Image: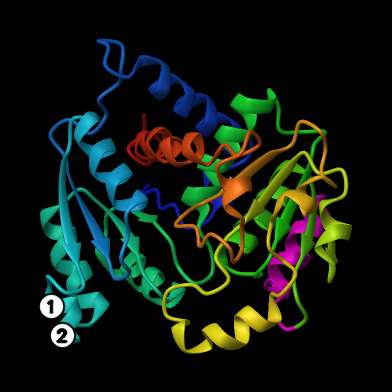
């Protein structure tokens, strides 16, 4: 059966923890003869409709270190940028490569790739979710705090794709997650409903001070994502008071850690002092993208 990674739930019951265990193994054996190479002899196409630094870098390095050959396609460097239908690109890719990662604006385009490629497709970000990043975040939390359960997680800012995937993770792992979002910028209601059914302890506040109180893990993201530049002025006004700064962070747990998937807009969603401060683990978080990407490839190809 072809394994696709569209959302965290695709990993199956207990799959998140198994993926994190696998990622830890890849981290600890990197550069040694014990490091698995499940992609030996395989070509993986990394398709980017949206620009990327960390996602592209981590995926290219992951495929290479797993023994595979990464083939990068960007929108500007392929016929995708000239309007070729996703289904046409998908069918060609499926006849030439063994797997695909796809970073795109529309979740519908990701599903079209899945429907027509005939090989494993991994979600490298859509407007609906960013499960790859959440796996990296969870690995970082577990390595820094020693556990996932029994912690209070906090999300500050836009109820965007990152927030949606955090909510999904909270449901699958039965976590406590407090979100603070301005009115009109809430996460997807269906995602919230499903997470609550799975056992997540969720709350949404309008004041960041309320959500961050006593939090062990504090996450934020840019207020204006790629493709939303025309909304920037309105968004900055709506998110006034949501900057994760030293004053706000004082309300979190004493040994709290701060996550940000990057790139960061210093002085908007996070202050320079917090990003570069002792609570920040964003550079470990960025590195975790490599190890968790390897774990996902190993899962997709039966490792």
Q: Which residues are magenta?
A: 184-202
Q: Which mark is residue 79?
A: 1
Query: Which residue is farthest top?
Result: 33
> Callout 2: 10 Å neighbours few (<14), some, many (20+)?
few
Quadrant of residue 300 within the rendered picture: top left
Residue visible at 63% across and 39% down in the picture? 13
Residue visible at 67% across and 73% down in the picture? 188
- Residue marked by disc 2: 82
Quadrant of residue 75 within the rendered picture: bottom left
Determine whether 173 is above or below 123 in the image: above
**199 on left or right of 19:** right
Relative depth, front residue between 263 and 72: 263
Quadrant of residue 271 within the rendered picture: bottom right
In magenta stretch: residue 192: yes
Relative depth, front residue between 112 and 137: 137
Percent of width and height locating residue 17: 60, 32
Percent of width and height locating residue 27: 41, 23
Whether label 1 touches label 2, CB < 8 Å: yes
Residue visible at 68% across and 22% down in the picture? 146
What is the quadrant of the C terminus in the image? Answer: top left
Q: Can I make out residue 70 in this image? A: yes
């Amino acid at each position: 059966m072809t394994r696709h990674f569209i959302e965290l739930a695709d990993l199956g019951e207990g799959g998140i923890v198994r993926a994190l265990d696998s990622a830890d193994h890849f981290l600890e054996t990197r550069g040694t003869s014990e490091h698995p190479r499940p992609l030996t002899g395989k070509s993986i196409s990394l398709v980017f409709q949206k620009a990327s630094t960390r996602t592209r870098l981590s995926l290219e390095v992951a495929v290479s270190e797993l023994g595979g050959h990464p083939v990068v396609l960007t929108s500007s460097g392929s016929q995708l940028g000239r309007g070729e239908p996703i289904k046409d690109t998908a069918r060609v890719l499926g006849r030439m490569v063994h797997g695909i990662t796809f970073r795109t604006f529309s979740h519908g385009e990701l599903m079209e790739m899945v429907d027509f490629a005939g090989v494993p497709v991994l979600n490298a970000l859509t407007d609906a979710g960013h499960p790859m990043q959440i796996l990296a975040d969870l690995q970082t939390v577990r390595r820094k705090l020693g556990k996932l359960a029994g912690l209070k997680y906090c999300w500050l800012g836009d109820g965007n794709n990152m927030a949606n995937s955090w909510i999904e993770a909270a449901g699958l792992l039965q976590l406590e997650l407090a979100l603070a979002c301005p009115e009109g910028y809430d996460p997807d209601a269906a995602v919230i409903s499903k997470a609550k059914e799975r056992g997540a302890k969720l709350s949404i506040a309008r004041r960041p001070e309320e959500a961050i109180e006593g939090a062990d893990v504090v996450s934020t993201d840019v207020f204006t994502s790629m493709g939303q530049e025309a909304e920037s002025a309105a968004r900055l006004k709506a998110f006034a008071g949501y900057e994760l700064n030293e004053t706000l962070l004082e309300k979190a747990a004493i040994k709290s850690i701060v996550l940000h998937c990057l790139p960061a807009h210093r002085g908007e969603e996070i202050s320079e002092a917090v990003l570069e401060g002792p609570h920040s683990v964003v550079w470990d978080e960025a590195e975790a993208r490599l190890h968790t990407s390897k774990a996902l490839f190993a899962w997709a190809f039966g490792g």
